[in-house]
Image (spheres, grey):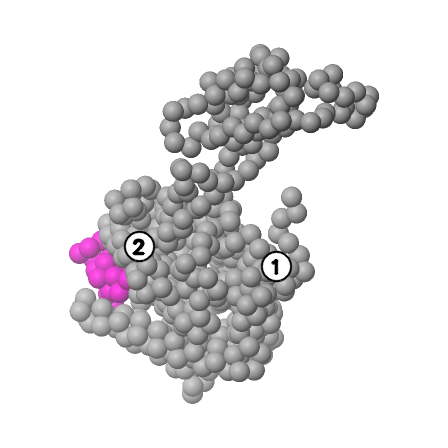
Amino acid sequence: MTPGKSTRLFIASLLLAASPLALAAETPTLNTANTAWLLTSSVLVLFMTIPGLALFYGGLVRAKNVLSILMQCFAITCMVSIVWVLFAYSLAFGDGGANNAWIGGMAKALMAGIGVDTLKGDIPETVFAMFQMTFAIITPALVVGAFAERMKFSSMMLFSLLWLLVVYVPVCHWVWGDGWLQKMGVMDFAGGTVVHINAGVAALVAALVLGRRKGFPETAMPPHNLTMTVIGACMLWVGWFGFNAGSALAANGTAGMTMLVTHIGAAAGSLTWMFCEWIRFGKPSVLGIVTGMVAGLGTITPASGFVGPLGALVIGVTAGLVCFLATNYMKRTLHVDDSLDVFPVHGVGGVIGTLLTGVFAATTLGGVGFAEGVTMGKQVTTQITGILVTAAWCGIVTFILLKLIDVTLGLRVTVEQETEGLDTVLHNETGYNL
Amino acid sequence: MKLITAIIKPSKLDDVRQALSSLGVQGMTVTEVKGFGRQKGHTELYRGAEYVVDFLPKTRIEVAVASDMAERAIETILQSARTGKIGDGKIFVYDLEQVVRIRTSETGTNAL
């Protein structure tokens, strides 16, 4: 916001205080209900990363690496928060002037011009920036699952920082910051492209560039604490209401429907995965049902503000089935060590969800409908463009970043250190002293 | 004197303890252990990845008894630990040379 604008806003608020009705029609005013919901949503989404995702991932690794996962999630949270305020928010959501199709500007660096009274729509811009910050935090944190149990902490920090700036921020701007994909009409309500495809593709590339953990797949590497994983998963489910319904940026009917379809997606994905395992392997597993939940939630995310309950049910079931098959294919056939299955769950889920948004947004299928003059076929084509652009940009840039870090800092700990475990080697601590 | 070491199913521990107490056995040492016999291990499945778990959790009990009581103790363990299914465990019996109660320095059967 320019100094001129904030001065006007200041004067306006003075006048408003004197005469409540005089300027109400022409000046955007703060909506306290919307603000309250976005304050709440920001808290919920932060809660998804710490402790939700940290516990979910932490339980899935071996006991000797549990702290390294918690540490990575925590450190990413802190680092992204600072960088977001320094200039990443400005690049993602600031005005980029002539280049705005590609990237925002630096006018809001250091939160310049954003004060107590600055509004974004009808909520304070501080709240909008905080809400978006929590998305920027969880996305690189999701990638951690791909290189778990073998990456150097220093390289992980550098990678997450650079990845945020050259992958997350541009894609976020393209899709949500008035960039070219948004102008093209890509429908991504809460992050099918920006969050899930981005994280999933980065995870796949990271798993391939770093290579498998020592002993994979012959050696048993079972989760060390599934109780912790289930607790984390439940926190993710609850937090996801902030993630999706908060993306309505208002406490209104859209937010209500978004919350409902989000819940349906989670439940349908969970049950579908459970039945798939039951039929395929003879027993329904706890890890299976919670993984199906994450798949269902990731998949409903881009569609959540656009589809109705029926669409959500189809999307949830599809997510459970396809992500289940993808996970098994990656592990059992391809032997790719995407250690905590980030790509087959988030990447594949993000693709399905973004694609199906173009179908189930149709009013005939219970959705909110397409933009004027847009047919389902045209919308699906636009969605595919969004998917391909995000996957290509993320894949190529992630590969380059990892290769650069590999030749400078090195990506992996030594084989001996990997065997000993990252907790003692990198952090001088152990998770459990029993 | 005899030292009887039995590897049993963890779920049978309470039954065995009660049965031995009824017989008049004064004490025992219990350890949680892992191992395999003819039962072998089992497979666990995590998101489609199969892991063979070689070592199963078992409970090891150690009981020192007078020689004339050894046969009855063994029979008691057999009765109380048996389920009839594979994996019920084994009993090992050793000659025991000496026993000393630390508090009183008593030795032999007096120390049992």
> Where A268 falls versus A156 (above or below)?
above
- Which residue of the protein is positioned furthest toward the bottom in this rendering? A98
Image location of residue A31, percent across then percent down: 48, 57
Amino acid on which the number 2 mark rests in the picture: Phe
The residue that mark 2 highlights is A324
Task: Let me know if marks 2 and 1 both belong to one chain.
Answer: yes
Corner quadrant of residue A375: bottom left
Image location of residue A105, percent across then percent down: 50, 81
> Where A162 falls versus A59 (above or below)?
below
Corner quadrant of residue B59: top right
Q: Any mark on residue A423, and which?
A: 1
Relative depth, front residue between B1 and A200? B1
- What residue is at 56 percent from the left and 32 percent from the top? B60
Relative depth, front residue between A277 and B17? B17
Q: Which class describes the residues within 10 Å of circle 2: few (<14), some (14-19), or many (20+)?
A: many
Q: Is residue A24 magenta?
A: no
Residue A342 located left or right of residue A184:
right
Q: Which class describes the residues within 10 Å of circle 1: few (<14), some (14-19), or many (20+)?
A: many
> Where B4 falls versus A346 (above or below)?
above
Amino acid on which the number 1 mark rests in the picture: Asp
* Magenta stretch, residue numbers: A352-372
Image location of residue A212, percent across then percent down: 44, 67
Residue A247 located left or right of residue A49:
left
State which tag comes first along the sequence, 2 or 1.
Answer: 2
Where, quadrant-wise, is the C terminus of chain A in this rendering?
A: top right
- Identify the subunit bearing mark 1: A
- Identify the subunit bearing mark 2: A
